[in-house]
Image (cartoon, coloured by chain):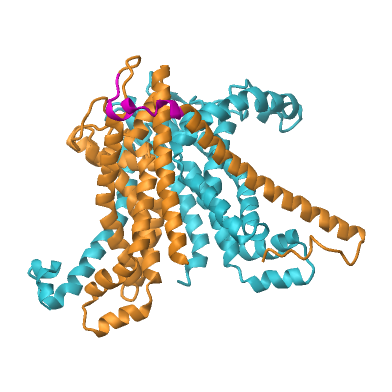
């Protein structure tokens, strides 16, 4: 497909309109190159700025010390721990639900076709719904009734973002499992739920795991849903019932502050979180590429 | 089948034949949870917003005021800012995304396209708050020192479009917000476009090349007409993302309750307003309710856009 018979080589006619066509083609090709290069430059600019501003803070104390008032140093230990706990809980809550819904969408089409289309449609809407509104929602139904902000509320908000991602990948991966495999299992006398869980899901487990990892990567950088749910906490706290710090919220608070040590820590946190997320994404994509071969 | 003694259905004391029924009930409950999630969001927003709509009526949407002192609130400015920044983002992102998609599918060799395509998709994985910090550290000074003074000296003096480019070069504002959003949504739109372009039967393109069309003519006359519906769907998907974006916008929009012609002037969006003001509003106050009402409007706008997008894109996946 990369052969382009019209732009290279000799032209039969050399009339004015042919020249014009060739010029238009050249300009369009050039603009496509420019667009690609421009967006790649943005990516590298972001990575460069993150590394330049953030690498100075990659010291031992950043990882072992909690956040302190401005001017006293301190680290990000509570924020890192809080992020790990909240994203971990979010995946623990969201992934099973997403798995079940994905199974429903892929395996129950014969019986509940119309309802399945509705569920898939709504799940796709949730995939792109504004995340700050998810935060407001959880604030209203969890934080207000319980009377206080909590890490659990943050995890619940994030889990609402995990579910649609896992649904999508699980359904897609289950649809790749060949029909003959199901038929073989059913012929052996296995009930349908065993066929789905122990044959289909097992065959699709790499892809499903990929989806869960991508969901983890997506929610670990989310800030907006946490602002009104887990709030943030300056002290070391691992209890999901209490307000909990998280990297994105700490970055948000520190980046807007006028203290130099806080902004520096914000950049370090930003570098950490971006590096983590990109690492997950690259691993997943490399893994997928290997399996396809 | 001794092993079935440890299976979930056996543990629940259900006869072996009922395993399927139990499993079906469980997955149906999970599916209902999804509907409950979105329905609940809309309902809770509407419920929280009832105070504001009762106090201001439908005029809330076109009222420019946001004054906590006089307890007078309106959503006109944030709605305006949300729409302006999202439309600017689309105007900037669509040409970029289209160029990238054409480059990846028609110009680059498959191997290079794989690597570059992955890099561009990595941009989509970068969290929104990182875009905000980058925008504040890089884009805002760049706009304030170079782009905005230059544009107001040249474009700002032109009749007709002049007012769009006048004003103090703060660096923050609608245009910078739109630019940040454009960078964020370009990967999404280009991914959709790329998939559609790749799903096109190769014979169509090859026969067009065979007739002596140039590459651009193939793109313009063959690929684009064939994939128009899905391309528009992809653009709407990007628009839906841009409308609800919060953290990146909060850093660069300038956060002023303002409506005006100048693209350089600071403004706000519904999402940035909620992010900034919500922590300072007491539960049950009129301000709280007004913020919920603004959130409800954002919900309606973005869901409307996303529904259009999915309906346009569905023609493609209907065959599954």
The residue lying toward the viewer, choosing from B152 and A198, is: A198
**Picture layout, residue B100 above or below residue A291:** above
Place of residue A19 in the rendered image (x, y in percent of width and height, measured from the top left):
87, 57
Task: Say whether residue A59 is magenta.
Answer: yes
Place of residue A77 in the rendered image (x, y in percent of width and height, measured from the top left):
29, 30
| Chain ID for orange | A
The extreme right residue here reads: A15
User: Which quadrant: the N terminus of chain B?
Assistant: bottom left
Q: Please name the predominant secondary structure of the magenta segment in the image.
A: helix
Q: Quadrant of residue B211?
A: bottom right
> Which residue is rendered at x = 68% and y = 69% of the image?
B205
Place of residue B165 in the rendered image (x, y in percent of width and height, measured from the top left):
67, 28
The boundaries of the magenta stretch are A54-68
User: Which quadrant: the C terminus of chain B?
Assistant: bottom left
The extreme left residue here reads: B13
Q: Colour of chain B?
A: cyan
**Picture layout, residue B240 above or below residue A245:** below
Instruction: Note whether residue B276 is visible.
Output: no
Place of residue A282 in the rendered image (x, y in percent of width and height, measured from the top left):
45, 50
Instruction: Note whether residue A53 is visible.
Output: yes
> Which residue is rendered at x = 27% and y = 45% of the image?
A88
> Which residue is rendered at x = 64% and y = 22% of the image?
B145
């Amino acid at each position: 497909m990369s052969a382009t018979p019209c732009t290279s080589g000799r032209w039969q006619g050399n009339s004015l309109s042919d020249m014009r066509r060739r010029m238009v083609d050249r300009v369009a090709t050039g603009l496509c190159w420019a667009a690609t290069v421009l967006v790649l430059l943005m990516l590298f600019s972001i990575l460069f700025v993150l590394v330049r501003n953030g690498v100075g803070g990659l010291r031992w104390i950043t990882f072992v010390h909690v956040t302190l008032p401005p001017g006293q140093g301190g680290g990000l230990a509570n924020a890192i721990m809080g992020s790990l706990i909240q994203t971990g809980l979010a995946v623990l809550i969201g992934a099973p639900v997403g798995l079940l819904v994905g199974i429903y969408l892929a395996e129950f089409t014969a019986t509940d076709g119309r309802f399945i289309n509705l569920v898939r449609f709504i799940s796709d809407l949730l995939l792109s719904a504004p995340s700050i509104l998810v935060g407001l929602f959880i604030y209203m139904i969890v934080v207000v009734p319980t009377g206080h902000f909590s890490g659990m509320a943050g995890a619940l908000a994030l889990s609402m973002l995990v579910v649609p991602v896992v649904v999508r990948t699980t359904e897609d991966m289950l649809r790749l499992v060949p029909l003959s495999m199901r038929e073989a299992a059913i012929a052996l006398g296995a009930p349908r739920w065993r066929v789905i869980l122990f044959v289909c899901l097992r065959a699709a487990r790499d892809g499903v795991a990929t989806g869960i990892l991508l969901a983890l990567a997506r929610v670990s950088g989310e800030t907006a849903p946490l602002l009104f749910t887990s709030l943030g906490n300056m002290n070391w706290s691992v209890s999901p019932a209490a307000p909990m710090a998280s990297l994105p919220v700490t970055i948000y608070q520190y980046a807007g502050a006028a203290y130099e040590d806080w902004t520096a820590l914000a950049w370090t946190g930003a570098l950490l979180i971006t590096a983590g997320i990109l690492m997950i994404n690259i691993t997943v994509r490399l893994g997928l590429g290997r399996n396809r071969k | 089948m001794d092993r079935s003694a440890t299976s979930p259905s056996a543990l629940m004391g259900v006869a072996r034949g009922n395993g399927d029924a139990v499993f079906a009930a469980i997955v149906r409950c999970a599916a209902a949870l999804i509907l409950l999630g979105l329905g609940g969001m809309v309902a809770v927003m509407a419920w929280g917003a009832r105070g504001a709509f009762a106090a201001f009526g439908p005029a809330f949407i076109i009222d420019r005021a946001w004054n906590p002192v006089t307890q007078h609130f309106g959503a006109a400015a944030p709605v305006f800012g949300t729409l302006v920044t999202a439309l600017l983002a689309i105007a900037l992102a669509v040409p970029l995304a289209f160029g990238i998609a054409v480059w990846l599918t028609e110009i680059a060799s498959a191997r290079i396209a794989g690597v570059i395509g992955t890099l561009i998709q990595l941009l989509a994985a970068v969290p929104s708050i990182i875009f905000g910090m980058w925008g504040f550290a890089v884009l805002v000074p760049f706009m304030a020192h170079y782009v905005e003074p230059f544009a107001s000296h040249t474009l700002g003096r032109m009749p007709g479009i002049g007012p769009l480019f006048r004003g103090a070069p703060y660096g923050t504002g609608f245009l910078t917000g739109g630019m940040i959003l454009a960078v964020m949504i370009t990967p999404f739109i280009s991914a959709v476009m790329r998939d559609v372009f790749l799903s096109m039967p190769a014979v169509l393109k090859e026969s067009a090349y065979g007739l002596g069309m140039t590459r651009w003519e193939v793109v313009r006359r063959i690929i684009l007409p064939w994939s128009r519906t899905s391309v528009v769907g992809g653009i709407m998907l990007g628009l839906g993302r841009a409308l609800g974006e919060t953290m990146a916008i909060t850093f660069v929009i300038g956060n002023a309750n303002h409506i005006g012609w100048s693209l350089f002037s600071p403004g706000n969006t519904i999402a940035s307003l909620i992010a900034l003001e919500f922590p300072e509003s007491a539960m049950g106050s009129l301000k709280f309710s007004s913020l919920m009402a603004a959130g409800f409007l954002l919900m309606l706008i973005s869901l409307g856009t996303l529904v259009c997008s999915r309906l346009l894109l569905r023609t493609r996946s209907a065959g599954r």
